[in-house]
Amino acid sequence: NAGVTQTPKFQVLKTGQSMTLQCAQDMNHEYMSWYRQDPGMGLRLIHYSVGAGITDQGEVPNGYNVSRSTTEDFPLRLLSAAPSQTSVYFCASQRDREPGELFFGEGSRLTVL
Amino acid sequence: AQSVTQLDSQVPVFEEAPVELRCNYSSSVSVYLFWYVQYPNQGLQLLLKYLSGSTLVESINGFEAEFNKSQTSFHLRKPSVHISDTAEYFCAVTLTGFQKLVFGTGTRLLVSP
């Protein structure tokens, strides 16, 4: 049972480049979300999904796109990377009847030059 | 909207000493409260939670937290810490159980011999 798997673990981009952070979970969880973690700011919600085909914006959605075509996968797309998007990104999933109990991936560290 | 305040960014303590990590929240309605732990280079893991019932909740590794509605607090305590407790601890609050999970800025617990 792999849990929540994120790829890549590390990535360096140049300003203006695009990329996709992959997230997959094998626990059949309906809810999935993306957070970014920055020093002194804790975790901030970027986008979330309550099921396949349904996504919504979190606290800091600008510059990011998501889609949810299957229950298992929830990729995060950076359309035109900016230095302000340098961060550690975490994907998380949750059982639908377990409020607040998130299962996190190990994170993806992104640097935008 | 709800928010979480963790006033201490870092708490140094000696091994076998007691520790308290403070968490205060703001909300005008009932909330669910959580403590997550993040070990170096890992994702967050749920440590303990308060949903309802007994205001004192415990984790399997000796941490406990007490929900205090009048003081809007959910402080985390351990009577005797170990080196292995060195990590960052995040307090979180939610109203709905999922998409509104709001994290504090984290407290880094540093346990030294």
Image (cartoon, rainbow, N blue to C red):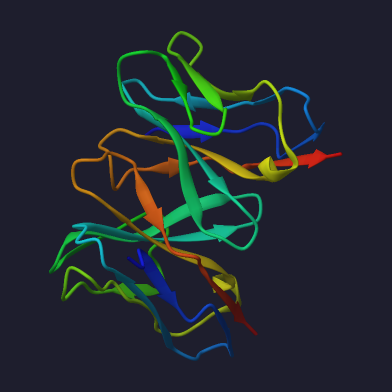
Residue at 45%, 85% (x, y): give it.
A80
User: Which quarter of the picture shows residue A24?
Assistant: bottom left
Residue at 29%, 48% (x, y): give it.
B99
User: Which quarter of the picture shows residue B105?
Assistant: top right
Residue at 67%, 41% (x, y): give it.
B85
Residue, far left: A53
Expressed as whole percent of the image width and height from the top left, the position of residue B98 reads: 28, 45
> Image height check: is B102 above or below B68?
below
Expressed as whole percent of the image width and height from the top left, the position of residue A46 reads: 39, 61
Quadrant placement of the C terminus of chain B: top right
Quadrant placement of the N terminus of chain B: top left
Expressed as whole percent of the image width and height from the top left, the position of residue A94 reads: 28, 51
User: Which quarter of the picture shows residue A91?
Assistant: bottom left
Expressed as whole percent of the image width and height from the top left, the position of residue B3 reads: 46, 34
Q: Could you tell me how many numbered marks the image carries? A: 0
Q: Does residue B100 appear left or right of residue A84 in this picture?
A: left
> Image height check: is A102 above or below B49?
below
Residue, far right: B113
Residue at 44%, 21% (x, y): give it.
B57
